[in-house]
Image (cartoon, coloured by chain):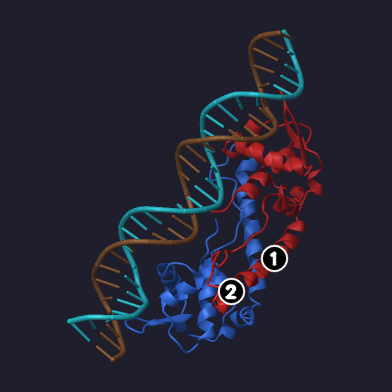
Chain colours: A blue, B red, C brown, D cyan
DNA sequence: CAAAACTGTAACAATAAATATTACATTTAC
DNA sequence: GTAAATGTAATATTTATTGTTACAGTTTTG
């Protein structure tokens, strides 16, 4: 199972970017995705930590972008929602008496670090504006 | 949660590559990883489908490589074990009345396809021999 | 042929992670 | 003060991964 944080956050930001002036409620955002509003609010809490959006409480409250879609990249979203992409480790406790078991996780770690650098480089080139251009 | 198939398969192949002549039993392989032998046999079944290893049943049976570690790349293993890397979709059933909900999954799909091409390109350059050189 | 030591695989159980829900305190507009 | 929001904790549900059990089939050896 993959955590949907990245996809949910992209979805939230896409919607906000289409209404840059308005404070959109978590219920409205959740309705577009068919998910629970609480999940939306959790991701919004994360976005606020990174100063990507601001929220207003109380009646007529909601959330809006703090910067233009052109200035937000998919890499930003990737970093805010996913620590790293990885393809699993060879178990927490491989047999230390075996030279392969002893070292393999470190090699995998290095490999995954490289993969993440690579993905970041790719995502850095795509802005939210570009990603949503045909919506 | 990430499926450990890639890591388990790398581990199995690493061990086999260190004993290229011998048929190693699933119990021995599992012992090096501290996992259940049945999981090993499942991944071996997959490797056999791709003609990377051969098995011998019965007493003194086991598995060995069909080709040198130099000729197996991490991309081969990636393709055999993971269909794709992805970062989630914006739900199975986003609201079709919303232009964002209607289109976002297709855009994500395209993005993930690109990411996978990228990862494949990177993994293609690393052979099993190289990956295991300091074990 | 019988015993031992394997593979192969299906069915099921256990664990862990992601997602959803409920509940309620707090804030703000009117 | 009421309605409509956010914020967040606690908990339940669902789904995916991983592990286990069980047993049929294969091969070697005596």
Using the image as rendered, state which of residue A12 and residue A118 is in the foreground.
A12
Q: Secondary structure at mark 2?
A: helix
Q: Secondary structure at mark 1?
A: helix
Mark 2 and mark 1: Cα distance apart in space:
19 Å
Q: Residue at x 59, y 61 (%)?
A: A85
Of all chains, the one bearing label 1 is B
Q: Position of residue B46 (x, y in %)?
A: 71, 43
The residue most toward the front is B97
Q: Quadrant of the N terminus of chain A?
A: bottom right
Image-based side of A116 in relation to C28, left or right:
right
Question: Quick check: can you spot residue B59?
Answer: no
* Residue A115 in sight in this render: yes
Residue B82 lies, in percent from the top left, at: 67, 53
- Residue B54: percent from the left, percent from the top? 77, 35
Q: Position of residue B7 (x, y in %)?
A: 63, 48
Mark carried by residue B31: none
Residue under label 1, please give it: B113
Residue holding disc 2: B102
Between disc 2 and disc 1, whose residue precedes?
A: 2
- Frontmost residue, B132 versus A44: A44
Instruction: Please report the residue visible at 76 percent of the width from the left and 52 percent of the height from the top.
Output: B73
């Amino acid at each position: 199972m993959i955590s949907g944080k990245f996809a949910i956050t992209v979805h939230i930001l896409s919607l906000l970017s289409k209404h840059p002036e308005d404070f959109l409620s978590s219920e409205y955002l959740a309705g577009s995705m068919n998910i629970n509003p609480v999940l939306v609010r959790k991701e919004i809490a994360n976005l606020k930590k990174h100063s990507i959006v601001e929220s207003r409480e109380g009646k007529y409250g909601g959330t809006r972008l703090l910067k233009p879609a052109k200035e937000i990249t998919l890499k930003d979203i990737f970093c805010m929602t996913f620590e790293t992409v990885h393809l699993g480790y060879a178990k927490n406790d491989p047999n230390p008496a075996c030279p392969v078991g002893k070292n393999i996780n470190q090699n995998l770690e290095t490999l995954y670090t490289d993969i993440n650098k690579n993905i970041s480089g790719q995502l850095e080139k795509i802005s939210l504006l570009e990603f949503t251009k045909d919506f």
